[in-house]
Image (cartoon, rainbow, N blue to C red):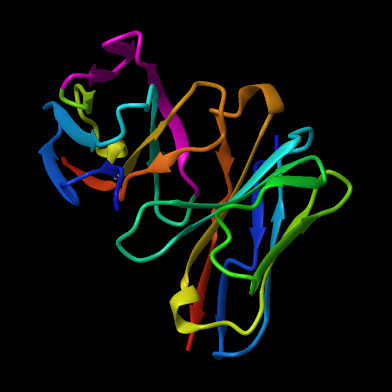
Amino acid sequence: GAGVSQSPSNKVTEKGKDVELRCDPISGHTALYWYRQSLGQGLEFLIYFQGNSAPDKSGLPSDRFSAERTGGSVSTLTIQRTQQEDSAVYLCASSLLNRQETQYFGPGTRLLVL
Amino acid sequence: DQQVKQNSPSLSVQEGRISILNCDYTNSMFDYFLWYKKYPAEGPTFLISISSIKDKNEDGRFTVFLNKSAKHLSLHIVPSQPGDSAVYFCAASVASGTYKYIFGTGTRLKVLA
């Protein structure tokens, strides 16, 4: 079956512009997560969705970051007024609600802010 | 402040030998640990887990050892194969069944043919 997909795979943008990153989770996975990995760092948790609601947004680094999920499926992570420190690989993962320790990751979006 | 540390950024091992990847943690409340493997241009994939009630978990060529008193876990791969070449992340959480994991920075393993 299809895994988690993300688009675009790479994004180069100029400082100050807005970007949208998309995640298509595995069909039937109610739980969805966004992470980012900056150079030399581990995966950093950003936000967790249970269905369309986000009970845990504690990892979003600033109010420039927002995410939504519609129809219990596709999720979009939006970064407004991008800064150079936002450059990272943004990873999306999904899981069954009762198997949250086993998350299936997408290939990531590599974001470069110039 | 890194709560989960993988101090070796890279490791090279000859094919057929044992690969040992190490991970240290600082939070004594962590009680569930995972290892993920990541190939280039792909997302991490779950490899093996261990709960703090155990000190060893084995799955084929992969064994994870947990030393709670030392706050240390290790992943052993034996025998190592070229296809094992990847980045390995360890992750920890305060309870099984939770979604919130703290990940290490990863160790790049290269298995030489």
> Height in image: B66 above or below A109?
above
In the rendered image, the residue lying farthest to the right is A71
Q: Determine whether, in the image, residue A77 is placed left or right of residue B89.
A: right
Q: Which stretch is magenta?
A: B43-69
Does B44 lie within the magenta span? yes
The residue lying at 70 percent from left, 34 percent from top is A1
Q: Determine whether, in the image, residue A60 is placed left or right of residue A66.
A: left
The residue lying at 82 percent from left, 46 percent from top is A52
Q: Nearer the viewer, residue A54 or B57?
A: A54
Does A28 lie within the magenta span? no
**Number of marks present in the image shown:** 0
> Height in image: B50 above or below A16?
above
> Height in image: A27 above or below A80?
above
Q: Nearer the viewer, residue B102 or B45?
A: B102
Q: x, y (%) of residue A39?
A: 34, 66
Q: x, y (%) of residue A95?
A: 65, 33
* Main secondary structure type of the part rendered in magenta: strand
The residue lying at 55 percent from left, 55 percent from top is A59
Q: Determine whether, in the image, residue B26 is placed left or right of residue B100.
A: left
The quarter holding residue B29 reads top left
Q: x, y (%) of residue B42?
A: 48, 51
The quarter holding residue B78 reads top left
Q: Nearer the viewer, residue B38 or A42?
A: A42
> Height in image: B21 above or below A107?
above
The residue lying at 44 percent from left, 28 percent from top is B94
Q: x, y (%) of residue A22?
A: 70, 62
